Amino acid sequence: MFIKAHRDSFCVAVMCDVFGVSRSGYYDWFDRAVSRRDQDNQCLDVEIKAVYKEHKQRYGAPRIAKALQSQGRACSHTRVARRMKSMNIRGLAKKKFKVTTDSNHKKPVYSNVLNRDFSTTALNQKWVGDITYIATEEGWLYLAIIIDLHSRAVIGWSMSPRMQGKLVCDALKMALLKRNFPSSVTVHSDRGSQYCSHDYKNIIKQYKLIGSMSRRGNCWDNAVSESFFHTLKVELVHELCYETREKARQSIFNYIECYYNQKRLHSALDYKAPSAIECAA
């Protein structure tokens, strides 16, 4: 292999002498057909690159392996990891981001009904919501979302240049409309002032929902929504620079509705996309 790799730099005859290999033996080896394993690896590399490109470099070895397996390709994630390493490609690296919540208020809060129990047996049993901010050259764009814990789909969202109560109300209203106004759903959030607003609590009461809030300063109580924002920022926001809020809106809309909900494999769903769980429910 050394001789083959360096034949353009050194004389083949000299290298054969150094390594004690006959020139005829080397050329006989060189002219042999590529092994079946090597041929399969070459095909696998093409398939890995296709999935990697389709998902815009967001997938690491486990998700690429699951995507290929769903297409009938026999491969383990460890083999995919080895092939990716040989090609010097990898999924987007995780980055830490700061979580901020305006909980310094004296408004009444809901008790922690969810209590970190993210398990479900059907849609519309438990929803979680949260707010994050996106930097643009025009200033901040705030994003509020509602996620159904059963499918992990983002079923409600709202974006605004101002972080007001209307932001979270609009996200919840979208979720209610999309799900045909179910009742008795546990709707969990942090203790941010927006979620303690009169308008938000009126929606909870009007549609007979069950309000739930995290303990003060405990992000793990709302881990699913925090995880979504982490994914959004690693896979999209950190890779782009938005000139305007409108461009950010369009980008985030496409990510949520066209990619995350429809295509992205979720580890908590046994590497299925939210849309697959929605269709099966």
Image (tube, rainbow, N blue to C red):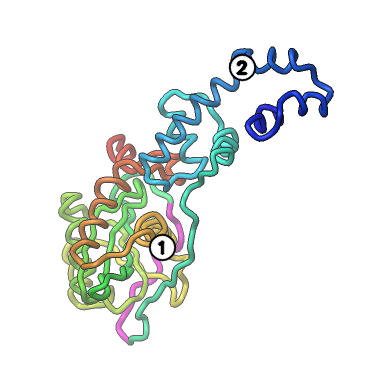
**Where is residue 26 shown, x and y percent of the image?**
72, 18
At label 1, counting other C-alpha atoms closer than 10 Å, the crowd grade (few under 14, some 14-19, many 20 or more) is: many
| Lateral position of residue 172 relative to residue 49, left or right | left
Which of the image's four quarters has the C terminus? Answer: top left
Main secondary structure found in the magenta portion: loop
Please tell me which residue lies in front, 125 or 161: 161
- Within 10 Å of disc 2 (Cα), the crowding (few <14, some 14-19, many 20+) is few
Decide which of 1, 37 is in the foreground and name it.
1
Give how far across and how far down residue 269 sits, in percent: 42, 42
246 horizontally vs 148: left or right: left
Residue 208 can be seen, yes or no: no
Quadrant in the picture for the N terminus: top right
Q: Earlier in the sequence, mark 1 or mark 2?
A: 2
Residue to which mark 2 is pinned: 35
Q: Would you say 250 lies left or right of 271 here?
A: left
Question: Which picture quadrant has residue 87?
Answer: top right
Q: Would you place residue 58 above or below residue 232 in this image?
A: above
Q: Residue at point 66% right, 29% down?
A: 7
Of the residues shown, which amino acid type is indicated by label 1?
Glu
Distance between the alpha carbons at the discs numbered 1 and 2: 47 Å
Secondary structure under the numbered disc 2 in the rendered image: loop
Tell me the magenta residue range: 106-118
Residue 4 visible from this viewpoint: yes
Q: Is residue 214 above or below residue 183?
A: below
In the image, residue 90 lies at what x, y percent?
A: 51, 46
* Relative image position of residue 201 (x, y in whole percent): 22, 72
Q: Is residue 232 above or below residue 266?
A: below
Name the residue: 31% across, 49% down.
Answer: 153
Q: Can residue 101 be found in the magenta stretch?
A: no
Residue 64, numbered label? none
Instruction: Give the numbered dot on residue 226.
Output: 1
Kind of residue sitting beneath label 2 = Ser
